[in-house]
Image (tube, rainbow, N blue to C red):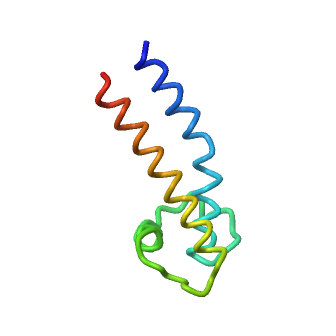
Amino acid sequence: MVTNILLVLLILWGIPSTYFRSKFRKIVYQTNDWKINIKPLFKKEIMGLFINLYPDNKEYIRVRNYYRIYLAIYLFLFLLYYFSI
């Protein structure tokens, strides 16, 4: 029962991931092109999560912090699900 609830929470929490990732990637790669969402350009994206690439860009810092919190909760839900099996 708990496993099923965690699975549903994990799926529901994953739905807005495309929005957050798209917004973050558009800032990191400095483009508005929709194709950035399907390209596997991981290095700069990962660096953007852990290193302050654009210290003067307030929008980047705000979106990065929201994306970090989102990913931390997603990881927490995944670990709860994984260890509850």
Q: Is residue 73 above or below residue 81?
A: below
Which of the pair 36/50 is nearer the observer? 50
- What residue is drawn where x is 55% and y is 40%? 14
- What residue is drawn where x is 47% and y is 67%? 41
Residue 84 vs residue 12: left or right? left
Q: Is residue 31 above or below residue 82?
A: below
Which of the pair 79/21 is nearer the observer? 79
Residue 48 vs residue 23: left or right? left
Residue 78 vs residue 28: left or right? left
- What residue is drawn where x is 49% and y is 21%? 5
Q: Is residue 38 above or below residue 64?
A: above
Q: Quadrant of residue 79?
A: top left
Q: Is residue 62 above or below residue 55?
A: above
Q: Position of residue 76 (x, y in %)?
A: 40, 42
Q: Position of residue 8 (x, y in %)?
A: 53, 25
Looking at the image, the residue that sits furthest to the bottom is 56
Looking at the image, the residue that sits furthest to the top is 1
The C terminus lies in which quarter of the figure?
top left
Q: How many numbered dots are placed on residues in this image?
A: 0
Residue 6 vs residue 67: left or right? left
Q: Position of residue 23 (x, y in %)?
A: 64, 63
- What residue is drawn where x is 49% and y is 82%? 53
Q: Quadrant of residue 44?
A: bottom left
Which of the pair 43/7 is nearer the observer? 7
Q: Position of residue 18 (x, y in %)?
A: 61, 50
The N terminus lies in which quarter of the figure?
top left
